[in-house]
Image: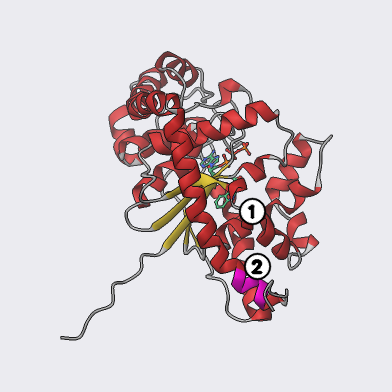
Amino acid sequence: MEQTQVERKKRLFSGIQPTGTLTLGNYIGALRNFKLLEDQYDCLFSVVDLHALTVRQDPAQLRKNCLKVMSLFLAVGLDPDKSLIYFQSHVSGHAELGWILDCITYMGELSRMTQFKDKSARHADNINAGLFTYPSLMAADILLYQSDMVPIGADQKQHLELARNLAERFNSVYGETFVVPDGYFPKVGARIMSLQEPTRKMSKSDPEDTYIALLDEPNIIRKKLRRAQTDCDNSVVFDPENKPGISNLMSIFSAVTGKNMDEITAEYDGRGYGAFKDAVADAVIAELEPIQARYAKISADKAYLAEVMTKNAERANALAQRTLLKVRRKVGLAALKL
Ligand code: ATP
Ligand code: LTN
């Protein structure tokens, strides 16, 4: 009988910046999908610490945040024996490929990036070159591992588009080298909005009362949701344009319970926003409590974290080298052994 070849799983890459406390937006938009997709793909999940340097960081705090993000990866149930969970800065190939991609990225492309415009408005005293070229480094993260799939929130769509364009550009100039990656966006909750300004995305760099942190205690979660901005017509109906506040809460509820918008309206319309906000709080607390319990154990086990960190960095490095060797050769950098 003819032997059938075992099909290689497709590769998946995603990264989260260690720039503070992860929010419910990060969880619904990205982290939760990591777990859902983990079995289907050959995965790399990176704490993208080099990206965090584009905004001024306190060094001691940054180190703590990196371990916190890694602990959260593990607390949502990602398996470090199956997936590569590692720090971006432990694989120097990210920075190297980032530079090579910088050299085929146009200034005009980078100037159009909305995240650059937002962040330079927010950090007007530190509009640095890294903030500007950040999207090429993100493209390098993805292309370095020949990734097929990138689970991200809607705010990263523009960056992923650039990664695709750079892969195609490189391939057309130097010959077939990179896989052109696809994005994976959640059906509900791809852009969770701020609780206080529901026309802006929920962001971990905004004031505390605008987001739910994954590690917030239940009473804090309830308090923040009760105080969330809503209109005053008291109808639980999904209408993001005219009713952004209540629609955002409905998206959160839908994402964590699996109920669709019609079912939510049928169940909660006419009962007042107070009752609905409490139901959202119950659902979010129930979703986060087991993660928080696992986080408490994992984050206390420094030896385990160190082991995951070193073992996975080595494996990621080995994978990265394969692409880098090819890229160096294609662009004409001389090999060390002539
Ligand atoms: P910052 O606010 O510091 O820029 P961030 O939360 O936007 O940080 P990351 O932490 O690196 O950025 O984002 C990690 C992942 O979470 C990305 O895939 C991003 O698309 C997703 N994400 C971030 N905010 C939201 C949100 N409000 N809704 C849905 N997904 C989000
Ligand atoms: N740019 C992303 C974080 C990020 C990322 C990546 C996501 C950096 N590199 C590679 C997916 C794939 C952000 O700011 N949320």
**Does 240 sit left or right of 254 as displayed?**
right
Camera-side residue of 81 and 24: 81
Camera-side residue of 6 and 325: 325
Q: Is residue 273 above or below residue 116?
A: above
Residue tagged 1: 92
Q: What residue sits 40% from the left and 65% below the top?
A: 10
Q: Is residue 151 above or below residue 71?
A: below
| Ligand 2 contact, mark 1 (Cβ < 8 Å) | no
The disc labelled 1 sits on which kind of residue? Answer: Ser
Eye-nearest disc, 1 or 2 = 1
The disc labelled 2 sits on which kind of residue? Answer: Leu
Image quarter where the C terminus lies is bottom right
- Residue 288 found in image quarter: top left
Looking at this rendering, what residue extends furthest in the front direction?
Answer: 337
Residue tagged 2: 166
Q: What residue sits 70% from the left and 40% below the top?
A: 53
**Residue 336 seen by the camera:** yes
Residue 61 falls within the magenta-colored stretch: no
**Does 235 sit left or right of 113 as displayed?**
left
The secondary structure that dominates the magenta segment is helix
Q: Secondary structure at mark 2?
A: helix
- Position in image of residue 103 (x %, y %): 76, 66
In primary-sequence order, the first of circles 1 and 2 is 1
**Does 191 sit left or right of 268 as displayed?**
right
Magenta-drawn segment: 325-329
- Position in image of residue 89 (x %, y %): 62, 46
Q: Secondary structure at mark 1?
A: loop
